[in-house]
Every structure is written in C-alpha cells, then in structure tokens.
Image (cartoon, rainbow, N blue to C red):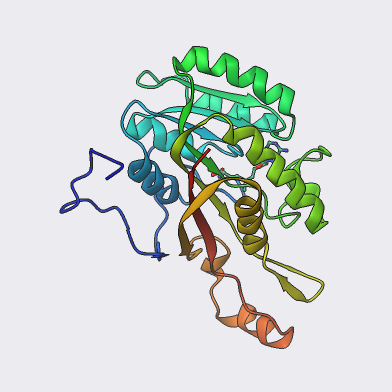
Amino acid sequence: MINTEEDWKTTDLNVDSLWLIDKRDSSGKHENNYHGNFIPQIPNQLIRRYTNRGDTVLELFTGSGTTLYECEKLNRNYIGFDINSEMINYINQKMTDTQNIHYLINECDVTDTDKINALMNQSFKWCETQSVDFLIAHPPYMDIVKFTEKKEDLSNISDLDLFIEKFTLSMKNGLQYLAKNKYFAVVIGDVYKKSEVVPLGFYVMNAIKQNFKVKMKGIIVKNIEGNRGKLGSQGIWKYRAMNSDYYLFKHEYIFVFKKEF
Ligand SMILES: C[S@@+](CC[C@H](N)C(=O)[O-])C[C@H]1O[C@@H](n2cnc3c(N)ncnc32)[C@H](O)[C@@H]1O
C-alpha cells in the first residue's frame, strides 16, 4: 500500500474507476470562483492515496489553488506554477495564515524549461527536499476556456498538435523532479470542435505513454456536477443537444501514472 496512513477498512478513498461526486466541497478556503477549477475532492482523494504527511506535491497548472488548500488541510508541502499572475496574488492572500506546511507558488510559464529549473531549485531549498512525491496537472482543455491573453498560455492554443507538443513539454519539465516510482495524475476533458468530438483526453494519455517511461495505473472517469453539469440535461440544454446533434459533456478523465524513470 502506498499510503500508510489510511486504514483500508474505514477510509473513504474511492477505489472505483467511476467517480460520481454530487456535491462540491466548499469548506475552508475553497471558493469556486475560477472557471474550470477542481472539485476539491479530486486532489483530496489523489493526495491521500499517493502521498503521506510531510510529502511534497508539485502542481503544473495551479489555477485558483484548490490543490494547495487540500495540501494544507492534509499537511503536505506544495510547489505550484501558473501563468496567471492574478491567481498567484489571490492565493498568496489566502495563505497568509498558513503555518503547518511549506509552500511556494510562482508565476511561471510551465513550458519555459530554464525558468522552471531555476524556480524548482529555489523551491527545493524552501521545502527542504530534493524531489517531489506526487505531481498533478490540470491543464486548459485547449482553448475552451481562455485564462489569460499571454501567448504562452495553453488556453490560447486551438491547434491540437501544438497543444499536445506544449503539454508534453510542460510534463517533461515537471516530471524530471518527481522521484522514480512515484505517481502523477492528469485531469483533462474532451472538447467539441467543428461539429465533432475531439477526444483530447485520449490524445493527452497517448502523448504521456509515448514520451515517458510510465505505467498507466488508472483511468478514472468523473462526472461534472456542480459545473456545466448543474445546467443538466433538461430544458434548453436538452433541446440544444438534440437540435444541434451533440451530447452534453458530463465526464472528465483522471489519468494516473507511475513514473518509472
Ligand atoms: C484548468 S485551469 C486549472 C484550475 C485548477 N485546477 C483550480 O482548481 O483552480 C488551467 C490553468 O492553467 C494555467 N496555464 C495555462 N497555460 C499555462 C502555462 N503555459 N504555464 C502555466 N500555467 C498555465 C491557466 O492560467 C489556468 O489557471
């Protein structure tokens, strides 16, 4: 067992490959005011399953800090990067009272290898570690939700091949700091483009399998209640789906891998 702190008989860790989360955890620092943010239960489950107290989590697309707040709750140290400086300021304000963990968040383009390397060196000094124990990445789903105007922002990429190239580079930059035999997770959804489904999740999964020596440990499908899903498949959305010939996306993927290099 990877986590030595959870008792398999009593834990609420979800070991099914289908996660139907009906209600978003809105306790503590979680505010749900950033479009496309995590349901906090996702990082919570992953952190508890794949790390122990005192371990360090690295996040490549920090966003509004959902994973960091869970790390704080669970006593895990945290290093995170996001290109959106507004979010870095927002999170820093929310973390002024923190005492129990080391954390460092940086405004950084995760495709910028030199900058990542410099910031990781600083972060390791601060977090008193030489490698991270878990990596999590929740990138934009191509250009479906635009986050910033910056050209390096992955949410400004509408071309699939370029998106996969930049995403893969981001993962390369982050994965070198994950210790061997540790785990990482990518959370991603599919998209519609030009009247057809682009299975972005499958492309992302394939890119990881092809570019890195990893073992695939889980393909979890989760529902998306509490986001677009709360609009439901009733009324106007049902009409639009039938009339315009598409299905309403409810699912997203959580891909879990074990790093073997
Ligand atoms: C889906 S959101 C992550 C949301 C996060 N999980 C949360 O709970 O708030 C994707 C994030 O990736 C960031 N991003 C996009 N391109 C980036 C890049 N090149 N480097 C770093 N961050 C980037 C965006 O600013 C956005 O905050």
Question: Residue 176, image x and y in percent?
Answer: 59, 31
Which residue appears farthest toward the left when viewing the image? 9
| Picture quadrant where residue 69 is located | top left
Going by the image, does 11 lie left or right of 105? Answer: left
Q: Nearer the viewer, residue 201 or 99?
A: 201
Question: Residue 82, image x and y in percent?
Answer: 65, 33
Question: Residue 248, image x and y in percent?
Answer: 61, 75
- The residue positioned 60% from the left and 53% from the top of the image is 209
Is residue 205 visible in the rendered image? The answer is yes
Q: Nearer the viewer, residue 29 or 153?
A: 153
Going by the image, does 149 lie left or right of 237? Answer: right
Whether 201 is drawn above or below 107: the answer is below
| Picture quadrant where residue 53 is located | top left
Which quadrant of the picture is home to ligand 1? top right
Whether 211 is drawn above or below 197: the answer is above
| Picture quadrant where residue 91 is located | top right
- The residue positioned 31% from the left and 42% from the top of the image is 2
Which residue appears farthest toward the bottom when viewing the image? 243
Q: Nearer the viewer, residue 253 or 261?
A: 261
Going by the image, does 138 lie left or right of 51? Answer: right
Question: Residue 223, image x and y in percent?
Answer: 48, 66
- The residue positioned 78% from the left and 58% from the top of the image is 160
- The residue positioned 18% from the left and 46% from the top of the image is 7
